[in-house]
Structures are given as structure tokens and as C-alpha cells.
Amino acid sequence: SGGGGGGGGGVVFLCVCLVPAAMYKQSQPKKTEIKFKTLLSNTIHEVCSKRQGWKETDRDDWDFIWADKDWIRMHFDECRNQLGSHVRVNHFRNHYELTRKDHMVKNLKRMISNLRREDKAQEAAMYDFFPVTYLLPMEYGVFVEDFKRQSDRPVWIAKPTGKAQGRGIFLFTDLKEVKLWKRAAENRGNPKQDDEEDVENYVVQRYITNPYLVGGKKFDLRIYVLVTSYMPLTIWLYRSGFARFSAFRYTGAKSALKDTHLHLTNVAVQKTAP
């Protein structure tokens, strides 16, 4: 999922991926008992434990595992060849290519470039659903050129690539507020750069200053989908979802840019609203 609380009102898809661990192996007879393993002791464990015909195992003979992303990255490649075609895991191996802000932007831009190269301009134009985006500090120079071309001094929003719950997000209209990334861009490739000068990777986007509103407040929609395959693309849409709202009525006034309770819909942010 992307960082849904940071931009204009919109839709955030929370994606759970169930992946055949070894699709190329011969199918096995349908099992009457499903052995599951989960590395989490939360609602996931509770739900699996209550399913009829499901039995928890602490060994490596599981038919289904709910693992965290770090386990998938570290261990899945080691064991995948020993797993049957009926086995399922809850993450695609490289899911972060879509679920991390910087990787998602990179892949969207790559898709647009590929379509244009194939003379599919009309299809490429369909990817206009995300705002102008740059990665800092890698694209700082290109960002500054675009920033200086804008005569209307638009608002920009900056988001850390590896955080959630609205942490580290800020809005700005002045280059001085991203001077840390300027210094990092200038020092890139310099082996003498001190570790203390390293800055966190960020995405910077043109802020949507005229978002959809409900009752004058910003919102986003949480919609749940289950992706079981990318080739062919197979997506199951859950019927229910929910909306998140800001605590205060929205205003695009630049004097209110620092008010995260006005601009962000993240629950972690809104629960601290006065």
C-alpha cells in the first residue's frame, strides 16, 4: 500500500498477496487438514486458529505461512524449491517494488517511458493519476529545475520512503526547507562524506491543493484487495472498506501548511488532534 494519508483525498488499496510457493511442481491431492504457521501473535493468529480444519504447526511442514516481509526476503528463496504447489505464503518475494513509495514511483515512470517508446502515447496518458514526483536526494537537481520553473510557487509535500503513519511528512513552498537533501546531493559519491551527513530518502510531490472533500474535510478510502497472481493479474476485491477523515475542515491557505491534523488523514496523526 502507498502512503494514503499524505496527499489529496483518494483511494488506498491495502494488498494481501497469497503466492503459490512452487507453481511449477505437480499438484497434490486436496488436503483435509491445513497446517499453518504464523510469525505474528495478533489477529492473524487468532483467525487462523479458529478456522475449521486448520491446525497450527511450529515445524517447517506448513501448508500456509503468514510471515513478515523480512522473513520472506531472508528465507523464502532458500526453501521455495522444497515446497509443494499447494503451499501459500502471504507476500510476493519483491512486493516492495509496489509497496514502497520510491519503488512504486520508479516503476510507474518506467511504465510510462516504455509505453511511449512503443508509440503507445494514449495508453501512457492513462498514467496521469499520480502527481509530479521526484526522489531525494537522487533527483534533487531535476527537482530544483522544475521548482524554479513554477511561477505560481506551488505547495510540495515530502514523505520518507520507508515510514508509515504520517511520520516525517511535511509540506513546503521554499527550497530552504529541503536544504539537507541539497547537501546530500552535492556529496553523493564522495567517500569522505561523514555518516552523520546522511539523510533519509524522501519522495517529493506536487501537493494536491484542491482535493475531494466530504463535509469540508479531507479523507481517504481504505479498500482491501487480495492479489493471487501477477501473471496473469488476478485481484479479488473485498466488499467492505472504510474511510479516514481529518479532524478539521480543509483550507489551502499557505499559513496552515504546518498543521498536519488539517492535511493528513493518518489515524496515528488524527488521534493526537486537539
Image: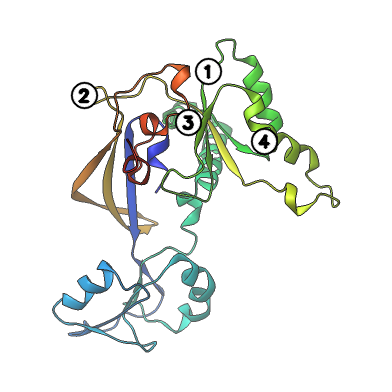
From the image, state whether disc 2 or disc 1 is nearer to you.
2
Circle on res. 215: 2
For numbered disc 2, what is the local secondary structure? loop
Whichever of labels 1 and 3 marks the residue nearer the N terminus, that label is 3
Mark 3 and mark 4 in contact? Answer it, CB < 8 Å: no
Residue 271, x across and y down, in percent: 31, 43
For numbered disc 4, what is the local secondary structure? loop
Farthest-out residue, right: 192
Q: Quadrant of residue 106?
A: top right
The one nearer the camera, 62 or 260, is 260
Which residue is the site of mark 3?
124
- Left or right of residue 68: residue 112: right
Alpha carbons under labels 1 and 4: distance apart: 18 Å
The one nearer the camera, 2 or 181, is 181
Quadrant where the image shows the C terminus: top left
Alpha carbons under labels 1 and 3: distance apart: 25 Å
Farthest-out residue, top: 151
Circle on res. 139: 4
Whichever of labels 2 and 1 marks the residue nearer the N terminus, that label is 1
Amino acid bearing label 1: Pro
Whichever of labels 3 and 4 marks the residue nearer the N terminus, that label is 3
Whichever of labels 3 and 2 marks the residue nearer the N terminus, that label is 3
Which residue is the site of mark 1?
154
Q: Where 66 sits versus 228, above or below?
A: below
Alpha carbons under labels 2 and 1: distance apart: 25 Å
Residue 201, x across and y down, in percent: 61, 45
